[in-house]
Amino acid sequence: MFQQAMRVCAIALACALCTAAQAQSNNELEEIRNQIRALKDAYESRIQALEKRLKAAEDAAAAQKAAAEEAQGAQQAAAAAQAAAASAPPAAAASAGSQNAFNPAISLILMGQYANYSQDPTKRTMTGFLSNSNESEALGPRGFSIGETEVTMSANVDHLFYGQATFAVGPDNNTVDVEEAFAQTTSLGHGFTFKAGRFFSGIGYNNSVHAHAWDFEDTSLVQRAFLGNNYSDDGVQLVWVAPLPVYVELGGELGRGANPPGSNTDKNGIGSSTLFAHIGDDIGTGGSYRFGVSTLRTSTNGSGTSIVDIDDRTGTHSPYVGDTRLYGVDFVYKWAPDGNTKYQNFKLIAEWFTTRRDGTLLFNENSAGVPEAAEAFKLHESGWYVQGVYQFHPEWRVGLRYDQLAEGTWQAGPVATAGGVTRPEFTPWRYSAMIDWSPSEFSRIRLQFNQDRSQIGLVDNQVFMQYVYSLGTHGAHKF
């Protein structure tokens, strides 16, 4: 019995020990679970706190940026309002804004000179050549005189067109000459530009340059003889600039043909046509060139052009009817150190023209002004010039020019010969030297000397002191 009681006690003790151990193990596991749960709750709290801080920082940064942009916008608006108030008329009416919506750029060119001639300028001609300009008007009178006063207005008409008008007032009359008045496309695309109205032709190089932008006081002899100071016409012009690595320009014009070397034929259709082409490129870092060819075809009626034999003292005048063809070659080279023309630059220009006239001479006008005789007539003449201008100081330039006309060939019949229309064996020429001072881009004072031998038997030493002043907005000049 005792042994059995002992076995029962041992079993009970073992069970008690196992229960105690199991209870202890459960307590440890629960404690570990509680610690993990506490850590998890702590990390979640910290993450939520960090997320809240991040959100608050982002909101603050956005608010600061918005405030800065608002302040900057207000500052710009205030500056714009201040500028508008400063530029506005002091007492503008409510309708003034609509009236001033079209506000063209306006420029005024003032020119004047003192001239000294050793020969009478009122009797000037170029011996053996059909001058397409009045020589005395081209040179100006002796002594002090004002030159051409020029007013130009220009502006964009809209997003498609640009307009320009240039008016010139001569020194000795009260008439206003419309030199140019044209509309031109601004966004035709593909390198094309279309112009319509009255404009200086693109033939040659110097023809399209206004007098105030000439490098000398006067233009070349060949320009005056064949085209006048500037040949213009009423018509249309189309120019195309090719999309090439070098500059390539092709152009053509159709006109009325009313100006010399043509004349108003009073008929429908086209009175003149012009073609020209230019190519140019850079030479190194400081040089550039442009080479051009051009041609003009026009015609005259009986009242358009006269043959002048020798000069106004001994010559005879015979109306010429027929076609005139003009061909020209021009070359321009410009150089400046690294392309900077402000302090130093050089420009070389050369042009050659030849003209062919094929038509009829009219003679012996009766009391009603009707010619009673006619004879076939052909004339081939040419001429050229070369000039160089060197700017050695930001305000000072010097230049030299040489002109020459070639008598060419002349075919006239016995009636012309009997009437005194003869071809003198004479080659007109001239050389010029100038120095000018330009204290700014708006003013220039020039001293020039010409020795002119364009009239047979005469040497005309000419001295000019010229001023050119530009007021207002003026566009850039051509290359």
Image (cartoon, rainbow, N blue to C red):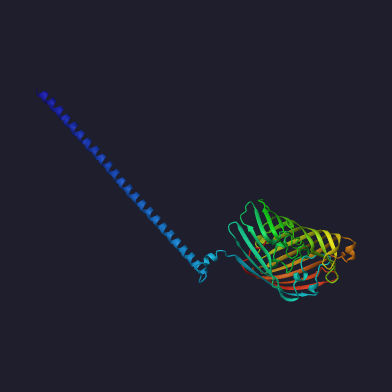
Query: Which image quadrant: the N terminus?
Result: top left
Percent x, y for residue 104? 59, 65
Furthest-top residue in view? 1
- Spot the residue most to the left: 1
- Provide residue 100's location: percent of width, then percent of height: 55, 66
Say whether residue 17 is left or right of residue 472: left
Name which quarter of the figure residue 146 lies in: bottom right
Q: Residue furthest bottom?
A: 143
Does the rendering let one see residue 12?
Answer: yes
Residue 355 visible in image: no
Quarter of the rendering occupied by the C terminus: bottom right
Query: Residue 343: where, in percent of width, then height?
Result: 66, 66
Q: Quick check: 41 left or right of 382?
A: left
| Residue nearer the viewer, 279 or 409 | 409
Residue positioned 74% across, 68% down in the render: 218
> Which residue occupies 77% across, 73% down?
462
* Location of residue 139 by image quarter: bottom right
Is 334 situated above or below 471? Answer: above
Residue, x 39% and y 56% (percent of image)?
Answer: 63
Instruction: Give the x, y percent position of residue 338.
Output: 66, 60
**Tag count:** 0
Q: Residue at x 32, y 48 (%)?
A: 48
Q: Nearer the viewer, residue 191 or 347?
A: 191
**231, 244: nearer the viewer:** 231
Determine whether 83 is above or below 3 in the image.
below
